[in-house]
Image: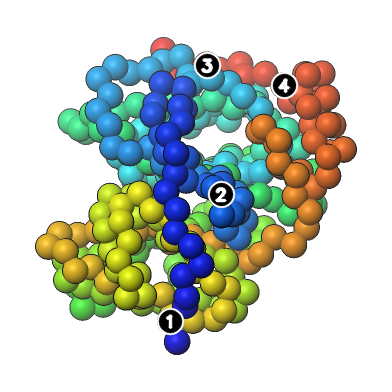
């Protein structure tokens, strides 16, 4: 049986440093999909100038950030001493844990002739016990992202987070979670089954597609009900389409979100701010690899 659609929504424009983005999650219908509590979409844009100064250092606590860059490159640096640069098709994950300051550069890919930037940033809520852990960072280049060619030359599926069949991402799972990037060829379809009590949503960055026999449009986030069932993706257009499918088990602990912090109580939010202002998150000592 096919899963029912719970809602569809479009984001709103916001600024991410010098970039213009669409804030897809949270929205007026929900503040989370499984452990995913935030999604910014950077639509394709040409960037002529390399930014060497970062987009603005800021703290986090209680979450993991995930940047997935379809086209371009992202440079990361943080107060735990982590630095890395990923290129088109790569991802980087940072566990803020008990507190960190980080900054990023979004630039065109220095390894290619293209000057486009196109990507996503998610926040993943951590279980209470993991919010108290030390920060960590994992960069993943494009050739390290697990990929499966779909049957009948239908396209491919990349596992950015979680697992699919025998494929598993390098990103740790503190709860059941998944993020797939699916590309579906013209005139093709693909289905997958989702278990009971799993929150799941699809985001359509660039093209329209049929989801369980209903057409949705580019820029829409589509969430499904939590009953076990099938999600069918059908491409009736004359060109390939891209879909992000993500979600996971319901977060059952209390959740309080304020600014860059997501904790379990208001008292923990107050502590997060107090520790930040007391300098307990450290400072970024390396400003950029590009200098």
Of labels 4 and 1, earlier in sequence is 1
Q: Residues within 10 Å of mark 2 (few under 14, many from 20)?
A: few
Q: Is residue 77 left or right of residue 75?
A: right
Answer whether labels 2 and 4 touch (C-beta < 8 Å). no
Task: Measure how far apart labels 2 and 1 are at the Cα level.
Answer: 25 Å
139 to 5, vertically: above or below: above
Q: CA distance from mark 3 to mark 2?
A: 37 Å
Figure check: 97 above or below 228 = above
Q: Is residue 233 left or right of residue 39?
A: left
According to the image, what is the colour scheme of the structure?
rainbow
Q: Crowdedness of circle 3 by 10 Å Cα count: few (<14), some, many (20+)?
A: some
Name the mark on residue 282: 4
Q: Identify the element where label 2 is drawn.
A: loop
Q: Secondary structure at mark 4?
A: loop
Q: Distance between the Cα atoms at labels 4 and 1?
A: 49 Å
Q: Which residue is mark 2?
A: 28
Of circles 1 and 3, the one toward us is 1
Where residue 13 appears, as percent x and y from the top left, is 42, 34
Front label number (4 vs 1) = 1
Numbered label attached to residue 2: 1
- Upstream in sequence: badge 2 or badge 4: 2
**Which-is-in-front pick, marks 2 and 4?**
2
Mark toward the start of the polypeptide (2 vs 1):
1
Badge 3 is on which residue?
287
Q: Residue furthest left?
A: 238
Residue at mark 2 to residue at mark 4: CA–CA distance: 35 Å
């Amino acid at each position: 049986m096919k899963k029912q659609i719970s809602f569809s929504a479009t984001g709103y424009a916001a600024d991410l440093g010098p970039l213009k983005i669409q804030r897809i999650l949270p929205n007026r219908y929900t503040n989370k999909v499984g452990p995913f509590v935030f999604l910014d979409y950077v639509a394709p844009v040409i960037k002529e100038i390399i930014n060497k100064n970062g987009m603005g250092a800021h703290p986090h606590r209680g979450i993991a950030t995930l940047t997935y860059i379809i086209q371009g490159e992202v440079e990361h640096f943080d107060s735990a001493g982590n630095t890395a640069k990923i290129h088109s098709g790569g991802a980087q994950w940072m566990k803020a844990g008990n507190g960190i300051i980080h900054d990023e550069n979004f630039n065109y890919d220095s390894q290619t002739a293209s000057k486009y930037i196109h990507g996503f940033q998610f926040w993943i809520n951590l279980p209470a016990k993991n919010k108290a852990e030390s920060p960590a960072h994992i960069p993943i280049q494009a050739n390290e992202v697990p990929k499966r060619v779909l049957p009948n030359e239908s396209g491919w599926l990349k596992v950015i987070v979680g697992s699919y069949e025998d494929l598993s991402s390098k990103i740790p799972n503190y709860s059941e979670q998944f993020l797939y990037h699916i590309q579906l060829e013209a005139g093709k379809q693909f289905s997958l089954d989702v278990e009971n009590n799993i929150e799941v949503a699809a985001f359509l960055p660039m093209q329209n597609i049929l989801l369980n026999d209903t057409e949705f449009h580019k820029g829409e986030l589509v969430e499904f009900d939590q009953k076990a069932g099938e999600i069918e993706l059908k491409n009736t257009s004359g060109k390939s389409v891209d879909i992000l499918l993500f979600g996971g088990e319901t977060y059952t602990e209390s959740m309080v979100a304020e600014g860059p912090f997501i904790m379990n109580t208001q008292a923990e939010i107050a502590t997060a701010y107090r520790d930040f202002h007391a300098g307990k998150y450290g400072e970024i000592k390396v400003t950029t690899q590009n200098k």
